[in-house]
Image: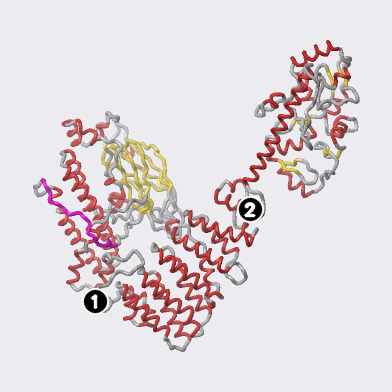
Amino acid sequence: MPRKLPFRVIHVSGQDESYRAAELNYHSPLTKGWQASRYCLYPQDIVIQLENRSRLRKIQILSHQYLIATKIEFFVGDIPDEQSQDIENARYTRLGYVSLSDNEKTGYKARELKSVHVDAIGLYLKLNIHKNHINKYNIYNQVGIIAINVIGDEIRRPTDLTDPDVYLDPDKRRAIEADPSLEGLYNKPDFISPLDDLAFDMYQDPEIAGIIRKLEKKKQEAVLQERFEYAKKLKAAISELQKVGEKLGKFEVEKRQAVENEDYDKAKLKKVQMDEYRLQVYKDLNLPDLLETSGSRHPQTIDLEPIRQPTPPRLQELSYRTPPQTPPPRTPYDERPLPAMKNFTKRHVRPTDLAKDFIPPPVPEEDDPPPESSSGITGEPEPMGEKELREASYAIDVFGEPLVSKAYSKTWSYREDALLAVYKQVQESSVSGKEECRNLLKATIFLVKRAIDDKVYAVFKAGLHLLRMILTEYIAKHKLQKQDYVYAVEKTIPNLLHKGGDTAARCREDSKSFVLEEASFPDVKSTNIVPHECTKPIKLSLAPRQAQSQCEIVESLYRQLGIKTNSGLTVDNLMQFCVTALGHNSGEVREVAERIIKELYKEAKEPVKDYLPPDNEKNRKITLYRQLYEYFDRVDGKPSKSEVKKRKSDDERKKQQEIEMLQQQLQQLKDMASGKQDYHPSPRPKKHKPKLKPVDESILENKKAPPRRPSVASKKMKQDAKKKNDKKKKDDDDISMYNMDNICIFCGERNESFTEEGLDLHYWKHCPMLKRCTNCKQVVEIASYTEHLLTECELKTNYQRCPRCTEAIPKSDFDEHTAAKSCNVARTGTNHCPLCHQNIGAGEEGWKSHLMSREGCKQNPRRLLALNKTPAAGKTKAAPKGKKTPR
């Protein structure tokens, strides 16, 4: 079964002195990791050596949050049997590479964990680390790796690598030999324990991690001994210890940060807190009994039922970009007060310090405030810490420390009382100087911002009440300038927009309603500051609920204000906002942005399209843009896609009917030629002139048959027709109208050599009414050559019709051709020759005269061949005059 393989770094191409490669040999929450030297050359190499020759199954890399490599290549190294174990004798095989994200979407605050599954045997693993992603934090062009983890099986008997027992622990192998039924439990070649995953050691306190591994081993032994009740208790204890280990790991990081900041009081506090918490957990779990170190095989009963009280917020976990997991169930160790809290209270530690270092009291998740005691609140709010005093210094200068300390209190009712007191003081203010009024305004806005972010609904509402009074009464009363309205809104609207993503529905709705309300205040409306702030493009990494809320605010503002003059909303700022929102990964956000764009298009029309990708087939394949384009078409009165599809279907049906009609006519001609019936042509559809294209009978019988040069009549049909003709002894002139033998249906030439093969040769090389397409080599009529290039040719997409001469012009020359305006304009009532580009007589006779006469088309080489051909005696005969050659 694969397990975590110990290793050590034996070679590195470069390192920062503060972040050496030896950091990679250990895994813990305090691991700093390796960083390349400043302005190093790439690629950088790291080589690690495993304790024993092993079969690698999984490699994990935890990247730095902003010193990020673009790519990491992996090589496994092994040493031939006849050579000594030295890195110089290693032979490496490339396994592949992984690419790392630039981390811009997370704001460079998360670390990417890459896991790669491999199957390779060796003693060494080399990492080839390529150049870094560029960002504003990586000023020295470095790369960094926080941790490396290798999971696999040590090879015990290298002579037989295919045997699964090679990778078994000796103790487990002996157990299987004693009881073969246990093989299914131990011999799991592909199972990797979660305790061997890199994320486990990087989250867990090392001491707790070691205990968890011991308990896991005990659990497996208990299962083998069928002590299932004991195994169940061990499983529950492991689950609890994992949560405890995460908290202790977090505390260890905070202690280290305090030491680096030389805040030794806080570091000492953290150390004592951790020790007492650890001992309390061990005592509650009765750890010696669980590990059976006290000699007992029957551990005491452990009460693991959760305490029925609100659960405090969990400490923030280390930020790793790993797949989200279902949060674990609440446990007593999440909810019990830390033991150090009581002990340090006895030592007269200030409550403010405790507030900073310990888990805060439960905060209501809904918008109602938590219940207070029946006797009300007594005493004074806790004093403010140094950081808070510095942060609130401006407000303290105006309102005094007692009032501001209430606003900073951990008790929600103190915070609400502070806002009510500020409201009364500001409303009744009698200061006269502009500067004093502005100082009071700035201090009030500072407290309003904190109130908007407050999780208790009563405090949040008090903050909105105070802000409303500032915007509608205070600034106007003291005759301050417009820039003061702008200041008040600019400072608070980001907090209001953020509150729009709150989990409590009432908080979300109230924040959105207030933004719309303040946009309608007369003095605020004239500044256009609310539309300006709300239409700033959102970040694509913004939380879906907050992004949707901001989009809904912009939608309501547009309906409320429109894009009229001085409304603050324009096509430009609305479309820039919406186009950005269309790229958000939340469907609800994109849906609101689509609604805004559609409403805006009704009013502004074409300028809206300037901000969207071009309307073409490529972009219409994207569902989002296709829906917008189709909506625009409906607004403009253009046919929708379904209507165009229906029209195309109707055209195809008509075309099919015409083909069937032509098939009937051809069959009648065949029957007439064989003497079965007289010729009664079926009436052609009105206003339709069929195109005579060089296709054979197989195309008329099966549209999908590949095109070939035309053949008019089969040999059997011609033989039967000749017998009938000889028998009836009819005059050639009487038969010529109906007999298709030996006649070209295009130029009308009759020749006894025009058998099926002869006609093919005639069409292919000599007929003056036909030509071969220069692109697809198909034989087509010259009269329909332009239409062929535009609609039928294999390269039809390379041509475009000129609006002047109506000819098919290559797209590469089209702009130059149309700009020159030197082509011969096609005239109504005439034909236009695609060879000589001249206008000629109308109808079929016009084409025949132009393409076959001596004074005809000078660009038709077949015309001269036809004129110069000397008819062989008795073999060539023109079609009789006065009778049309069937077409």
Range of the magenta residues? Answer: 297-312
Place residue 509 in its image quadrant: bottom left
Is residue 14 in sight in this rendering? no
Q: Position of residue 421 (x, y in %)?
A: 36, 81
**Disc number at residue 375?**
1
Q: Position of residue 470 (x, y in %)?
A: 46, 79
Q: Position of residue 491 (x, y in %)?
A: 46, 72
- Mark 2, other Cα within 10 Å: few <14 / some 14–19 / many ≥20: few
Horizontally, residue 834 falls left or right of residue 579, namely right
**Disc number at residue 634?**
2
Q: Looking at the image, is 401 positioned above or below residue 455? A: below
Q: Which color scheme did the rendering employ for the protein?
A: secondary structure
Mark-to-mark CA distance, 2 and 1: 67 Å
Horizontally, residue 311 falls left or right of residue 673, namely left
Q: Amino acid at mark 2?
A: Arg
Secondary structure beneath label 2? helix
Place residue 872 in its image quadrant: top right
Front position in the image: 398 or 1: 398
The answer to whether the residues at label 2 and label 1 have Cβ atoms under 8 Å apart is: no
Q: Going 33% across and 69% down the picture, which residue do you hit?
A: 369
Secondary structure beneath label 1? loop
- Assess whether residue 26 is covered by the magenta stretch: no
Q: Amino acid at mark 1?
A: Ser
Looking at the magenta stretch, what is its main secondary structure?
A: loop
